[in-house]
Amino acid sequence: MQLDHVTLVTPDLDGTRRFFCEIAGLEDGPRPPFSVGGHWLYAQGRAVIHLVEATVPATRASAATRTAPRLDHFALRVAPGDEWRVLLARLRSHGVPYQLADVPLSGERQAFVALAPGVVVEFVTSADDAA
């Protein structure tokens, strides 16, 4: 089993698309003609992120309830070495804050980006050449 795609519903369709294309390096590509706006973003020829324009205003959940659907985070694997360094350089050049972390015992390094309230993107790579 492998991750097929992630769907993000966002009120900032263009800003979210720009983040994933200009910083994460995905490509905006063909999308079926659905009745709501959106983009399909591709990596290596596959649509891995489906962006959907929010048509209903977001609501805040109380401590007793949970809003659905929701997304905590998802992870995109990045090749170590040049691909990892280029990603970090793009984050810095676009002024996007991120946090780095090393995963204990796994030999992996992570970069976390808070894309929107309640949505975090994790980029993960092998720590061997991720310095």
Image (tube, grey):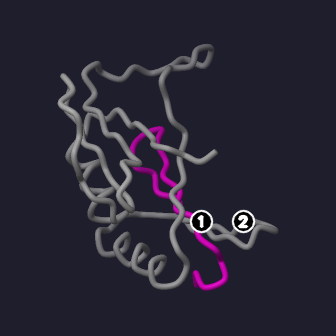
Helix, strand or loop at disc 2? strand
Q: Judge left or right: residue 111 versus residue 26.
A: right
Q: Judge left or right: residue 92 versus residue 53.
A: right
Q: Main secondary structure of the magenta part?
A: strand
Q: Quadrant of the C terminus?
A: bottom right
> Looking at the image, is 18 positioned above or below residue 66?
below
Q: Nearer the viewer, residue 130 or 44?
A: 44
Q: Which residues are magenta?
A: 112-131
Residue visible at 29% across and 48% down in the picture: 16
Q: Judge left or right: residue 32 versus residue 62.
A: left
Mark 2 Cα shell of 10 Å, populated few (<14), some (14-19), many (≥20): few
> Looking at the image, is 82 positioned above or below residue 61?
below
Amino acid residing under circle 1: Gln
Helix, strand or loop at disc 1? strand
> Does 126 lie within the magenta span?
yes
Farthest residue toward the right? 105
Q: Position of residue 2 (x, y in %)?
A: 59, 48
Amino acid residing under circle 2: Val
Could you say which quadrant of the image residue 8 lies in?
top left
Are the residues tagged 2 and 1 within 8 Å (C-beta)? yes
Q: Position of residue 78 (x, y in %)?
A: 51, 68
> Looking at the image, is 87 positioned above or below residue 57?
below
Q: Position of residue 76 (x, y in %)?
A: 51, 58
* Marking on residue 103: 2
Residue hosting label 1: 110
Gap in Å between the C-alphas at discs 2 and 1? 7 Å
Residue visible at 68% across and 70% down in the picture: 108
Q: Earlier in the sequence, mark 2 or mark 1?
A: 2
